Image (cartoon, grey):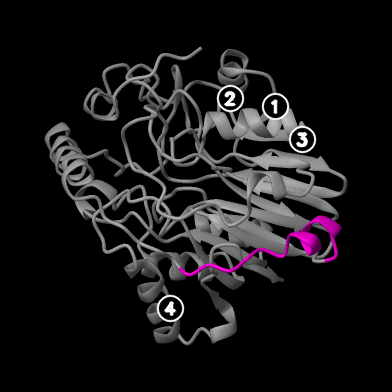
Amino acid sequence: MRRRFPLVLLIALAGCAGVGSDRLPGKPAHHVAGGFRNLDPEFRRPGFLTRWAFLTRHGLGHLIAPRTFEPPRVAPDVVALRSGRLNPSVTWVGHATLLVQLGGLNILTDPHWGQRTSPLPWAGPRRLAAPGIPFDALPRVDVVVLSHDHYDHLDVETLRRLVQAHDPLILAPLGFKAWFAEEGPGRVEELDWWQEHVVAGVRFVCLPAQHWSQRSPWDLNRRLWASWALLGPDRRLYFSGDTGYFDGFREIGDRLGPFDVAAMAIGAYQPAAVMRLVHLTPEQAVEAAGDLRARVLLGVHWGTFDLAEEPLDEPPRRMLAEARRRGVPAAGAWILKIGETRRW
């Protein structure tokens, strides 16, 4: 079992046991000794004092005056989801968790049914809104897609429940097989950027992102982070995971686009000194969807956990305003209610 550490300690010590910085001979450019790096030569993580100030300020806020928020929600159509007659469709469970029905498969992205996003069960950001689909009401889950190892995207207890109840194939970036070997059972396939795995005719392509990874003070960037393309026989979906804005969106759009839906993270962007290189603003999400040549932008990663300092209801308003400013039709910019399903 992995050791668990207070979240403040985790962030404060980030970098104490990082990886190398030089490219490994014969390996892709994002591989370094002991782990991985971002490809933008200008990428720098914020300094210790900047991170510490944010963690202290935000942590005290959770303790003294935690914010509350109730995002709009609807009752899920469990019968239709279980029958498969809504395929293809996408349902927002909350945060970065989507139930994607595509090519006859039921796929979960970054599944999180936990009550907190933290290494500790009694501290850290608490869930603001219940999951849009009760866990026991899920249809058969065939595939789980993981983008990276941060606690708001990878919830150990949720994964254990999924393995026990559904035994799905888990697709993850490099470095996760060893992690799963310590944390518990699971059928895991790990992929590098631009590698793919095919399940029942659906191609799952692991793609670049600009972010970082860490679950303890000793594993900074030892597991890869990624975005994903889910390519069915006649539909294409992009899932951003967590990422800052980078040139890779254009390359992904050129090589795999156009996409029918781009599910982009639009929350956790303030303070900019901490977030700007590793998370998208709502305006950048609109720009990235254009780079990807996506027909529909779906805004996710907001309103479920209080992870940053922007108003909790601000991300969708800013995303829709920017989409209008750029001339994106209303049908091309989606903000779903918790539990809502849409065909695509």
Q: Give the mark nearer the N terminus: 4 vs 2.
A: 2
In the rendered image, which quarter is residue 54 located in?
top left
State the residue in front, 273 or 77.
77
Question: Is residue 191 among what the camera can see?
Answer: no
- Residue 79: say if magenta: yes
Q: Which mark is residue 320?
A: 4
Give the percent coordinates (x, y) of residue 171: 67, 35
Residue at 31% x, 33% y is 123
Q: CA distance from mark 3 to mark 1?
A: 14 Å
Q: Which residues are magenta?
A: 72-85
Query: Which amino acid lies under the numbered mark 2 shown in the image of this protein?
Result: Phe
Residue that carries the numbered disc 2 in the rendered image: 176
Q: Give the mark nearer the N terminus: 4 vs 1.
A: 1
The reply to whether discs 4 and 1 touch (Cβ–Cβ < 8 Å) is: no
Local secondary structure at mark 1: strand
State the residue in front, 126 or 206.
126
Give the percent coordinates (x, y) of residue 80: 80, 64
Residue that carries the numbered disc 3 in the rendered image: 166
Local secondary structure at mark 3: helix
Query: Which amino acid lies under the numbered mark 1 shown in the image of this protein?
Result: Val
Does 232 sit left or right of 194 as displayed? right
Residue at 35% x, 25% y is 21
Q: CA distance from mark 4 to mark 2?
A: 36 Å
